[in-house]
């Protein structure tokens, strides 16, 4: 009798508890990101998991995948089940929508600041003591200067690099397109190695000791300095650079299928919170939240930044003119 | 059987009878040996030594830590899974293909052999690409797989498929010439004695080819664990999920963790060394076996 | 086809399974590449596969593979000779190590070769001050392709050399031929089919190689970009048909190479059979 009752009691208890059990679920998200954000998202994922646990009681583990921005977007198009993507430029996310219809057309309007919770820019990293005396973009086209940058065909960062140099040349030459083309042509003639992603280039410059100057994401340059010693490298801030806006969004079809929309949404929104912004700033991304930006003001050099929409008419246009097959970049190598 | 014993016999004689007329002066011998050793040192030993030196550069603790990292453990696990599935699949195929090709005559045999060889010559990148074209979201079965909640690309099945593809010919290619050389007398004798097909395969053929089979399995396993290009295309590089060891090497290499990258690489290099040792052992056993049979034949 | 062959059981089962498995794993997936390219017109296809950057990559891929296979033909023959004909300390060990490039994952080979030949590497630090750049140049591609093709020539020549009858050499010597003449007129022709098979195998393997090359090549368009990398690059630009078009060109070439190799092997076997 006693045992019977006890089993019944247990069954009832389990029945009552089961909704509770299913509430404290283990959720996993996949964040497909570009090359230099590895350290940023390792830290952010831990912070978000804590935040989400405190808020809902659920355990979130965020899996990461990194690579060149184009390569990563290609993966998502082919079915890599990313809940969220955090890529180097909006064109790559546009392509996810265009090629695979996984995101709506207006994805960039869903979050503040063009869906870019942090920004960055392009700077020049040189070896200690700046032996080649590099001060600005025009020093990169001088004969005998060896320049390291990844391949704009595959790397998002490299496309920002290219556009920053191009914008500088436009400004120097009163917006003369032909002269700007000649300028980037000369610049790429000085490039001995074109890696497929930003990280590969950092390795080439830093570990393999190749090149006099490395055109780099600002955050990547800071990180290289921190990881490998400030006694080895110096950051040179050019007179003009580009405002790089690495955007984030969720992949609607995936989150709806996996029923992770709420947590994916929260994951992206939390990037804009104070803690998210602090983590971004600590990893050398420029925060967009005013008071966090103020706090880290000293960390980031003041640079005259142009916007891609103003100078190049947006990513779609820039991609078509400069980076598509048969575009300006291809012409550089076909002489 | 008889041809083997004749050649082996004459080889023995040759060794004894090799006179000055058929060998080179000592100095030429040593120069040739020196050149061969220099070539092998430059291309084999120095790169191999570099792997272990770089791996231990930051000390033994860093080395061990790199290997017990959860991402590393999961990569090791995935690599073992992929190899453990690919190996038996290609094993069964290899035996079936060798049986058909070596024991029977049919039209189009040489084309079939060439087709079996094809994965050896196809670039691993192309091997990855074709599976994307079929199972990718934009591919033939992409939508269907998505609707049925099945994943091939960017999941374990895709990695296994790519691995099966690149290791496809090894066992078959090892067995075909071996079984052709052995002929089918023994099998036919067994048949006359009333053995069934499976009995013949199990009791006659497999014991005869066991060393060749093992040899092919060792090669398949080594290649399966080390494949990079094909797996790279279909992996998606999700840490702790779809990274194999060679992919992890690349990732660590790109994360300023050179010592860790070389630590995982050294594990793979160690595996390569074990492979070589096993292979040498198998060759030695096979040679010993051949000698014993030969002796038995000679005595009888 | 003779009556005797029909005695053994299992022909239908084994051949059927072979064809099924071959179709599922290899043929149907490969046909996907050909079907994908039908999205292109013939002239579009031609334009893609003959674009200057792609043509430059063929030149590099096939040129470097040819040089690598040639290096292996010369030094592989020499290594096989030394391993078969001479005795020296550690010979067995050296013999076992020849297969290392088979067993070592290509990515490991790639980072190891890069570490050795880069500016601050063991060999690179000796070569670079003398103006010889290996890492991140076409020369690096040659080094990597030589490495991965190394075992082929050694392993195809070795057994033939072992089985070579010494009587013919002795006869040549007794007829007054010196050692070089004996090698050139008697031994080398006997080895030639095997040597060419090994060469072709090393070449075929090198043409498709990816893992070990990308680390050391530098990947410059028109200069040090191999064809498999072009495929990857096109893929990453969402140019699926372009990637597949180049892949189809590589596939056709691989198939032709294999037909050639099988022809060579048939020739080599016949030569051997005649010799015995």
Image (cartoon, rainbow, N blue to C red):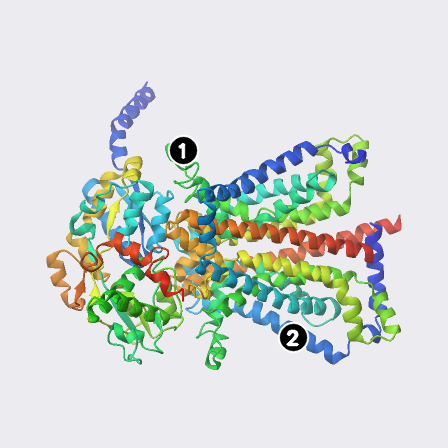
Give the mark toward the camera: 1 or 2: 1
Residue A86's place in the image compared with B98, above or below, is below
C62 vs C178, nearest the viewer: C62
Q: Position of residue B31 (x, y in %)?
A: 69, 78
SS for callout 2:
helix
Image quadrant in which the N terminus of chain A is located:
top left
Q: On the same chain: label 1 and label 2?
A: yes
Tag 2 or tag 1, which sits nearer the N-term?
2
- In this rendering, the answer to whether C160 lies above or below C44 is below
Where's residue C231, x and y in %?
45, 53
Which label number is shown at residue B12?
A: none
Disc 1 secondary structure class = helix
Q: Mark 1 points at which residue?
A: B144
Q: Which residue is drawn at 39% across and 60% down?
A: B252
In the drawing, does residue A220 fall left or right of residue B63? left
Residue B194 vs residue A261, the one in the foreground: A261
Chain where mark 1 sits: B
Local packing at callout 1 (Cα closer than 10 Å; few below 14, some 14-19, many 20+) is few
Tally of numbered discs: 2
Quadrant of the rendered structure where residue A124 is? bottom left
Instruction: Please give the residue where the numbered disc 2 appears in the rendered image.
Output: B35
State the image coordinates of residue B274 (x, y, percent, origin top left): 58, 57
Chain containing the residue with disc 2: B
| Residue B266 visible somewhere in the drawing | no
Q: Where is residue B292 in the image (x, y as percent from the top left)?
A: 80, 52
Q: Distance between the residues labelled 1 and 2?
A: 59 Å
In the rendered structure, are the residues bearing label 1 and label 2 in contact, judged by CB atoms less than 8 Å apart?
Answer: no
Which quadrant would the C terminus of chain A be assigned to in this image? Answer: bottom left
Farthest residue to the front: give it. C43
Whether residue B163 is visible to the viewer of this picture, yes or no, is yes
| Residue nearer the viewer, B259 or B256 | B256
């Amino acid at each position: 009798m006693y045992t019977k009752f006890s089993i019944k009691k247990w069954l009832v208890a389990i029945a009552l508890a089961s909704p509770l059990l299913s509430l404290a679920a283990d959720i996993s998200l996949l964040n497909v990101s570009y090359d230099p954000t590895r350290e940023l998202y390792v830290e952010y994922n831990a912070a978000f998991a804590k935040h989400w646990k405190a808020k809902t009681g659920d355990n979130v583990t965020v899996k990461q995948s990194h690579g060149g921005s184009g390569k990563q977007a290609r993966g998502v198009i082919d079915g890599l089940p990313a809940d969220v993507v955090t890529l180097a430029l909006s064109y790559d996310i546009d392509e996810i929508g265009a090629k695979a219809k996984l995101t709506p057309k207006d994805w960039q309007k869903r979050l503040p600041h063009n869906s870019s919770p942090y920004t960055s820019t392009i700077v020049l990293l040189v070896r200690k003591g700046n032996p080649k005396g590099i001060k600005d973009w025009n020093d990169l086209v001088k004969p005998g200067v060896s320049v390291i940058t990844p391949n704009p065909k595959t790397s998002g960062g490299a496309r920002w690099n290219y556009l920053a140099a191009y914008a500088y040349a436009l400004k120097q030459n009163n917006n003369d397109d032909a002269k700007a083309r000649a300028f980037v042509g000369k610049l790429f003639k000085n490039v001995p190695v074109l890696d497929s992603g930003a990280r590969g280039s950092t390795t080439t410059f830093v570990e393999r000791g190749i090149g006099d100057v490395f055109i780099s994401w600002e955050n990547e340059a800071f990180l290289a300095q921190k990881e490998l010693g400030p006694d080895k490298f110096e950051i040179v801030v050019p007179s003009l650079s580009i405002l790089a806006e690495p955007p984030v969004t969720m992949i609607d079809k995936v989150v709806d299928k996996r029923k992770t929309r709420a947590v994916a949404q929260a994951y992206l929104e939390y990037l804009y919170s104070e803690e998210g912004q602090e983590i971004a700033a600590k990893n050398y991304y420029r925060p967009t939240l005013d008071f966090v930006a103020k706090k880290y003001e000293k960390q980031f050099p003041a640079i005259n930044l142009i916007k891609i929409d103003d100078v190049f008419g947006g990513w779609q246009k820039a991609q078509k003119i400069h980076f598509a097959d048969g575009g300006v970049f291809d012409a550089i190598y076909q002489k | 059987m008889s041809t083997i014993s004749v050649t082996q016999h004459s080889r023995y004689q040759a060794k004894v009878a090799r006179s000055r007329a058929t060998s080179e002066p000592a100095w030429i011998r040593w120069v040739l040996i020196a050149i061969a050793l220099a070539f092998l040192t430059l291309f084999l030993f120095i790169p191999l030594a570099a792997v272990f030196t770089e791996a231990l550069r930051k000390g033994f603790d860093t080395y061990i830590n790199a290997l017990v990292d959860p991402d590393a453990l999961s990569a090791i696990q995935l690599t073992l899974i992929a190899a453990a599935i690919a190996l038996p699949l290609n094993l069964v195929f290899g035996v079936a293909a060798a049986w058909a090709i070596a024991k029977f005559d049919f039209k189009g045999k040489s084309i079939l052999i060439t087709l079996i060889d094809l994965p050896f010559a196809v670039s691993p990148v192309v091997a990855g690409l074709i599976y994307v074209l079929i199972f990718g979201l934009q591919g033939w079965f992409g939508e269907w797989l998505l609707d049925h909640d099945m994943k091939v690309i960017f999941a374990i099945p895709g990695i296994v498929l790519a691995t099966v593809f690149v290791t496809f010919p090894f066992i078959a290619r090892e067995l075909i010439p071996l079984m052709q050389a052995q002929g089918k007398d023994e099998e036919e004798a067994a048949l006359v004695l009333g053995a069934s097909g499976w009995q013949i395969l199990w009791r006659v053929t497999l014991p005869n080819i066991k060393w060749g089979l093992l040899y092919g399995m060792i090669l398949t396993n080594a290649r399966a664990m080390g494949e990079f290009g094909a797996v790279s295309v279909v992996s998606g590089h999700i840490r702790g999920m779809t990274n194999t060891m060679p992919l992890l090497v690349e990732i660590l290499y790109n994360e300023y963790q050179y010592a860790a990258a070389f630590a995982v690489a050294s594990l793979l290099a160690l595996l390569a060394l074990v492979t070589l040792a096993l292979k040498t052992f198998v060759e030695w056993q096979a040679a010993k076996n051949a000698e014993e049979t030969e002796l038995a034949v000679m005595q009888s | 086809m003779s009556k005797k062959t029909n005695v053994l059981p299992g022909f239908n089962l084994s051949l059927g399974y072979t064809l099924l498995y071959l179709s599922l794993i290899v043929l149907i997936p490969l046909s996907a590449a050909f079907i994908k390219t039908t999205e292109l017109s013939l002239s579009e296809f031609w334009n893609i596969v003959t674009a200057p950057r792609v043509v430059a990559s063929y030149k590099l891929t096939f040129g470097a593979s040819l040089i690598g296979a040639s290096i292996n033909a010369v030094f592989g023959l020499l290594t096989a000779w030394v391993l078969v004909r001479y005795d020296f300390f550690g010979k067995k060990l050296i013999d076992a190590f020849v297969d290392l490039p088979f067993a070592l994952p290509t990515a490991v080979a790639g980072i190891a070769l890069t570490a050795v030949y880069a500016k601050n590497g063991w060999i690179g630090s000796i070569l670079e001050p003398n103006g010889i750049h290996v890492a991140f140049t076409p020369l690096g591609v040659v080094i990597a392709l030589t490495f991965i093709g190394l075992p082929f020539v050694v392993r195809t020549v070795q057994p033939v050399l072992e089985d070579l009858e010494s009587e013919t050499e002795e006869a040549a010597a007794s007829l007054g031929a010196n050692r070089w003449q004996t090698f050139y007129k008697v031994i080398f022709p006997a080895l030639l089919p095997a040597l060419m098979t090994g060469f072709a195998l090393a070449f075929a393997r090198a043409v498709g190689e990816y893992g070990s090359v990308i680390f050391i090549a530098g990947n410059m368009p028109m200069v040090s970009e191999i064809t498999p990398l072009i495929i990857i690059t096109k893929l990453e630009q969402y140019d699926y048909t372009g990637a597949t078009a180049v892949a189809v060109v590589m596939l056709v070439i691989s198939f032709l190479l294999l037909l050639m190799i099988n022809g060579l092997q048939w020739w080599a076997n016949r030569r051997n059979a005649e010799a015995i």
